[in-house]
Image (tube, rainbow, N blue to C red):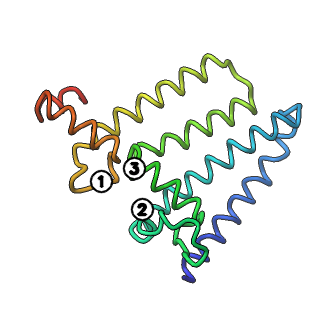
Amino acid sequence: VLLNTNTVLSGLVLSLLISAMLTPILNSLLATPALKTSLYSFLMFSIILLCSFISYFTTGAHDQSIVNEMNNRSVEPENWVGKLGAWLAHNFIFEGFGIASFIFVKIFAEIALWFGIRFNASKLRRMIFWDLFAILVLSIALGHFGVNLPYLGGVVGYEMNDYFQDYIGELGAMMVVL
């Protein structure tokens, strides 16, 4: 328990230091409070996702059994972000797209960056499209190993790979992914 507390405290200190360094730069770039709110919201959500995903690989076995008991106050998850982090990581990684879900962190960071720098919206759409495409392809490719390592491809990757194998065989499924 002491190790988890120290890890959480060091993560909070690191995020406060990064925030303190970026605040003067961001304040000069952002003109309206709505843009600041949007930027900080997407940035914080991407940091929350990243911390909960990383924590899932160290505490996921314990937290997976308590995900359905989120309303129970006596249940204490070991995820660094708490109950929200355990729920997010379980749904994104185990029930979702597996380790390809880390690309969602990149997507939300790109959106936050778009609110801060205001680059071309079509470029943002292209980046998000290719990120979502990469999530799907990686999930299906890693879903091939879903029987032994279910967190690699998640439920989506495992089921899609299983579907491909039913109709075009194991070799055909591998060729589609490659």
Q: Are marks 1 and 3 in contact (CB under 8 Å)?
A: no
Above or below 169: residue 97: below
Front disc: 2 or 1: 1
Q: Secondary structure at mark 3?
A: helix
Which disc number belongs to residue 57? Answer: 2
Q: Earlier in the sequence, mark 1 or mark 3?
A: 3
x then y, percent, for residue 1: 54, 82
Give the left or right position of residue 150, taking residue 166 as reference. right
Which disc number belongs to residue 150? Answer: 1
Q: Residue at x 61, y 54 (%)?
A: 48
Q: Secondary structure at mark 1?
A: helix
What is the spatial separation of the Cα atoms under label 1 and label 3, in whole angstroms? Answer: 9 Å
| Neighbour tally class for label 1: few under 14, some 14-19, many 20 plus, Cα within 10 Å | many
Q: Amino acid at mark 3?
A: Glu
Q: Earlier in the sequence, mark 2 or mark 1?
A: 2
Q: Quadrant of the C terminus?
A: top left
Above or below 142: residue 149: below
Residue tagged 3: 95
Q: Amino acid at mark 2?
A: Phe
